[in-house]
Image: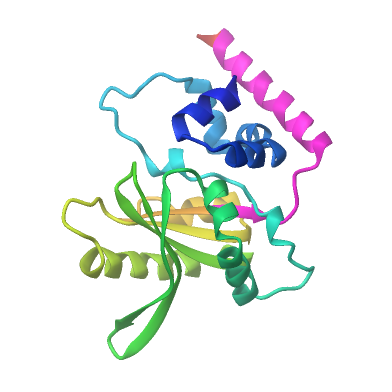
Amino acid sequence: MFYEEEALRGGWSVRQLDRQINSMFYERTALSKNKAAMLEKGSKARADDRIEPEQEIKDPYVLEFLNLKDEYSETDLEEALIRHLEHFLMELGGDFAFIGRQKRLRIGDEWYRVDLMFFHRRLKCLVVIDLKIGKFTHADAGQMHMYLNYAREHWTQPGENQPVGLILCAQKNEAVAKYALDNLPNKVLTAEYKTVLPNEKLIEKELEKTRKMLESKEKKK
């Protein structure tokens, strides 16, 4: 039922549906902290029908199709994502449209480059992605905040919402992410990526944990 509803909502092709099933999209959705909250709320629409970026950004992303070796650079990761762009778009979600890579911007007398840029149709905004092969740090948040300030002023078209930043990293500490990202003027999110599919036993354990959590909350109501 989950895959049927998502396929209808996202207009998936047979190939997309096959990809989502094989990469255990349902199980990964249950593992995600943001998605677990969404599942708890069910399919109830918001009063103002507003969609938040947190609802559209997954965590984690599984990029098993990249076939990366144990050691690779951020350039290797970016090039692999571009080579497998169709699969990456399927993993991101049906509303993401690719805009470009290594987009240059000049601030003062210094040049910078944005790794990847997408447009999200439902959010109606640019999504700037910064790739990190290591841990997420507070410095990453500051850099993304600068990118978004520039993107809002120079790249955003009339009628679009403010751009959103996504820091895609190999590992993050939830506490560091919370204090680095909360209450920023720009919306900056961080998500982990995995290059292998989740362990089945871990999935089963986390699903049971999530189910008990939701049941406990339901009993308290």
The image quadrant of residue 24 is: top right
The image quadrant of residue 112 is: bottom left
At 52% across and 29% down in the image, what residue appears?
Answer: 6
Q: Percent from the top left, x then y, of residue 18? A: 66, 38
Give 16 or 56, whichever is nearer the viewer. 16
**Residue at the extreme left of the image, as rendered:** 158
Q: Percent from the top left, x then y, of residue 157? A: 20, 59
204 in relation to 74, above or below? above
Give 180 or 68, whichever is nearer the viewer. 68
Residue range of the region highlighted in magenta in the rendering: 191-219
> Is residue 182 shown in magenta?
no
> Is residue 204 shown in magenta?
yes
Give 101 or 84, whichever is nearer the viewer. 84
24 in relation to 125, above or below? above
- Residue 120 as seen in the image, left or right of residue 90: left
Q: Percent from the top left, x then y, of residue 114? A: 43, 72
At 27% across and 86% down in the image, what residue appears?
Answer: 108
Q: Main secondary structure of the magenta part?
A: helix
- Residue 108 as seen in the image, left or right of residue 128: left
Q: Percent from the top left, x then y, of residue 93? A: 50, 44
- Residue 109 as seen in the image, left or right of residue 207: left
At 61% across and 61% down in the image, what residue appears?
Answer: 84
**Total numbered circles:** 0
